[in-house]
């Protein structure tokens, strides 16, 4: 194992009264409103909710791809106002470079990590490929890999620079159920071993309960925090565990109850 992946930082994200608006056809549209939340070091936080609840907007704000209109986002006390190598995003599409093999794709991610020799970068890339179970696929190009394998390479590329926070935007939604289940196991293994701070956006409530320490339920139009659920289940978790299914049903019930409520201005 290379030296640099072993160092872990005391990362903590703090959102205070965060509001974000966008220009729409009818004027300003509030995507998220008055969001206050803390993400502790080594926590796996999951954002869930229906379309229009601002999940992806919040992730873009955390990544520094968008800026808040009101409130603040801080990482260890420093304002988040632009993208940085301390926060990396893993998207739904793997976005691998087709002309690079698996090892070279992971090495590309390490361009964000200064102060390493070429040998150290290669050692780190191989470490993370091994961590996601692809040590024997380092010379394979994306077209030679399954969808799940490509997402594993993308995960290794995101982890290799050792970001303070890993932001995940529905990275499993395009995969079949069996592949998703395998990746849930991989993510939990990596999370347990590395204790990386992770924020995941998903529409899949069972997935949220399977992976998260806390699940934040957002309501739509505008996006607000509706309820926060602590997930006190032992790891590793399986998507079809009865206790997991019960918690997921509770969150689904809470979401359905909110969606059935009359909306402001309509009564």
Image (cartoon, grey):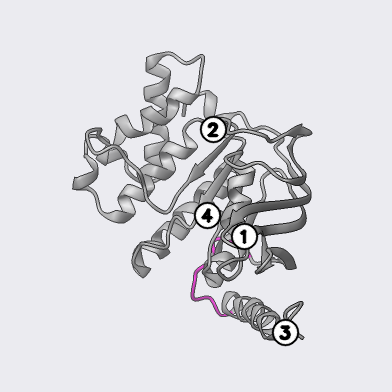
In the image, the segment drawn in magenta is 234-242
In the image, residue 28 lies at what x, y percent? 66, 56
- Between 13 and 52, which is closer to the camera in this rendering? 52
Residue where numbered disc 2 is placed: 162
Residue where numbered disc 4 is placed: 188
Dominant secondary structure of the residues highlighted in magenta in the image: loop
84 lies above or below 169: above
146 lies above or below 216: above
Find residue 261 and name its label. Answer: 3
Q: Is the residue under label 1 in contact with that under label 4 (CB below 8 Å)?
A: no
Label 2, label 4: how many angstroms apart (C-alpha)? 17 Å
Which of the 4 image quadrants contains residue 244? bottom right
Q: Is the residue under label 3 in contact with that under label 2 (CB below 8 Å)?
A: no
Secondary structure under tag 4 reads helix
Q: Is residue 133 left or right of residue 88?
A: left
Residue where numbered disc 1 is placed: 54
């Amino acid at each position: 194992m290379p030296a640099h992946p072993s160092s872990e930082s005391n990362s903590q994200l703090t959102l205070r009264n965060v509001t974000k608006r966008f220009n729409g056809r009818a004027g300003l549209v509030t995507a998220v409103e008055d969001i206050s939340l803390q993400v502790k070091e080594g926590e796996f936080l999951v954002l869930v909710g229906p379309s229009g609840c601002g999940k992806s907007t919040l992730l873009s704000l955390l990544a520094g791809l968008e800026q808040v209109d009101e409130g603040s986002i801080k990482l260890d006390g420093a304002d988040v106002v632009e993208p940085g190598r301390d926060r990396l995003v893993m998207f739904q599409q793997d976005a691998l470079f087709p002309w690079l093999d698996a090892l070279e794709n992971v090495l590309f991610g390490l361009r964000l990590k200064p102060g390493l020799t070429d040998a150290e970068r290669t050692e780190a890339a191989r470490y993370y490929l091994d961590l996601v179970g692809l040590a024997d696929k380092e010379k394979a190009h994306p077209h030679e890999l399954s969808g799940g394998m490509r997402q594993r390479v993308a995960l290794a590329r995101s982890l290799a620079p050792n970001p303070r926070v890993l932001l995940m935007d529905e990275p499993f939604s395009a995969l079949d159920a069996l592949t998703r289940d395998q990746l849930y196991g991989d993510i939990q293994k990596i999370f347990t071993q590395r204790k990386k701070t992770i924020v995941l956006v998903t529409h899949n409530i069972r997935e949220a309960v399977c992976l998260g320490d806390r699940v934040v339920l957002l309501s739509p139009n505008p996006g607000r925090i509706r309820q926060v659920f602590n997930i006190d289940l032992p790891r590793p978790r399986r998507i079809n565990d009865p206790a997991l299914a019960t918690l997921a049903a509770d969150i689904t019930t809470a979401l359905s109850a909110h969606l059935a409520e009359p909306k402001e201005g309509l009564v």
